[in-house]
Structure formats: structure tokens, C-alpha cells
Amino acid sequence: QIQLVESGGGLVQAGGSLRLSCAASPHTFGRGVMAWFRQAPGKEREFVAAISRTGDNTPYANFVKGRFTISRDNAKNTVYLQMNSLKPEDTAVYYCAVTLVPGPPKMGSRDYGHWGQGTQVTVSP
């Protein structure tokens, strides 16, 4: 069974930083393309960033380019999302997702078959 567990969310002031972590099942991680999505109240879930199995392909949503960085540590079966220069509009529940389908990282939520429970990020003005 594939398990994803996010952590690292919390309350931060605008301009601050947070690092999210997502621990995955060991038998899954090395084969998976990983991604972060987010969902704000009353809005649809949206793509944030993704990372290929080898870490050399990392697409980002335009609204986080230059502020967020996705990375993975295959030895620890963990993917990270470093979030800097946070804005109030970044407030959302952030979800980790994985797909075992080979190929480059995708940006659609339907491309990912397994999801974590989410972690809340709140950015105050």
C-alpha cells in the first residue's frame, strides 16, 4: 500500500519561509514522480510543483517560480517543498502526490493516483 505523509505546515507571517516534507513508502519512492498541489478554501486544487524520479526535471506553477523549490532525497524516501517569500495568497492545504506511471512530471491532478492527507499552510499579512 502506498502511503504519503506530509508535515511542516503552520502559521507564518508574509515574507517568511516554511519547508514542507512528504515521506513516502520506501517501495514506492524510487519509482515515483512526486508533486505538490494546494487547495485554498472555495477553490479548486491546483498544481504547485513536481519532480522527476531522478530530480532533474522540476516544473513549477508560474505563481511560485523563484519562491518555491522542490527537491527529493531518495535515501530518505522524502520530497520537500521549500517555500520562501510567502504571501497571504499562498494560504492553502498543501498535498503531496505520486504517480508510478513512467514519463516526465505532469501538472494535472488526475495524473496522480496517490495522495497524502494534506498539511495546512497559513500566511498572515
Image (cartoon, rainbow, N blue to C red):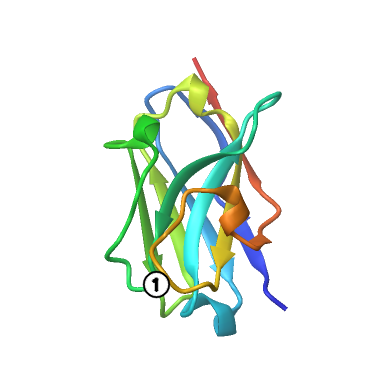
Count of numbered tags: 1
Residue 56 vertical placement versus 125 (above, below)? below
- Residue 51 pos. (x, y %): 39, 60
Horizontal side of residue 13 vs 45, given as left or right: left
Is 10 in front, or is 30?
A: 30
Horizontal side of residue 125 vs 39, given as left or right: left
- Residue 31 pos. (x, y %): 48, 79
Which residue is located at x 44 percent, y 23 percent? 87
Which residue is located at x 46 percent, y 74 percent? 102
- Residue 116 pos. (x, y %): 66, 57
Horizontal side of residue 45 vs 13, given as left or right: right
Is 48 in front, or is 79?
A: 48
Location of residue 44 (image quadrant): top right
Disc 1 packing (10 Å; few <14; some 14–19; many ≥20): many
Q: Name the outermost residue toward the bottom.
A: 27
Location of residue 40 (image quadrant): top right
Could you tell me the amino acid type at mark 1? Arg
**Residue position for label 1:** 53
Residue 17 vertical placement versus 42 (above, below)? below
Is 74 in front, or is 53?
A: 53
- Element type at mark 1: loop
- Residue 2 pos. (x, y %): 67, 74
Residue 52 vertical placement versus 19 (above, below)? below
Location of residue 5 (image quadrant): bottom right
Q: Looking at the figure, which quarter contains the N terminus?
A: bottom right
